[in-house]
Image (spheres, rainbow, N blue to C red):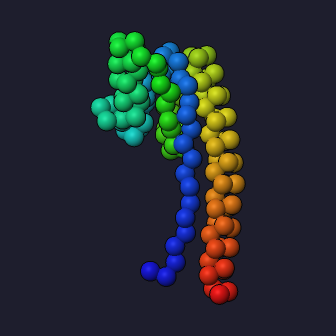
Amino acid sequence: MSKYIFYAELTAEIELSNEELNLLIECSERHYDSTVKSISMCGGFLYGLHNRRKWEIESNTEISNGDFKSRQIQLMLKSLEFENKPEAGNLYGKLITIAREMQTKNVALNKTLREEVMEYKNSLSVK
């Protein structure tokens, strides 16, 4: 191994209402793509969030938000792509805004991280 680099992957904490979560699950279940379908099936991240939320409501504890990586947000967006309900369009708009901001911040963060790693490597070779 002669080369390596560090990079960071951001996670977004997103507060989804129960209605938004249920809409995402419904759209995912009806989607043609098996990967999109899988997010609401047993083991999928929406399935897990739904179960956790159900437990939190039943046990009268604080409702937690979902933590989503870029790929997960992209899959939620894809699940909404053919839905004609106004609520789906509204949710799509919110999620696409988050996805774009996340991409911008991820590029900036990793640029800074690469620069710091290069500075560190250069400082080692100067000594």
Q: x, y percentage for residue 26?
A: 43, 21
Residue at 62 percent across and 40 percent down: it is 99
Which residue is most to the front? 127
Using the image as rendered, state which of residue 38 and residue 47 is in the foreground: 47
**Placement of 2 over or under 102, stated as above or below:** below
Using the image as rendered, state which of residue 22 and residue 119 is in the foreground: 119
Q: Is residue 52 visible?
A: yes
Residue at 46 percent across and 18 percent down: it is 62
Residue at 34 percent across and 19 percent down: it is 55
Q: x, y percentage for residue 77?
A: 55, 34
Q: How many marks?
A: 0
**Placement of 113 over or under 24, stated as above or below:** below
| Quarter where residue 57 is shown | top left
Q: x, y percentage for residue 60?
A: 40, 12
Which residue is most to the left? 42
Using the image as rendered, state which of residue 14 and residue 31 is in the foreground: 14
Q: x, y percentage for residue 18?
A: 48, 16
Residue at 50 percent across and 36 percent down: it is 67
**Placement of 55 over or under 39, stated as above or below:** above
The image quadrant where one finds the C terminus is: bottom right
The image quadrant where one finds the N terminus is: bottom left
Q: Is residue 29 visible?
A: no
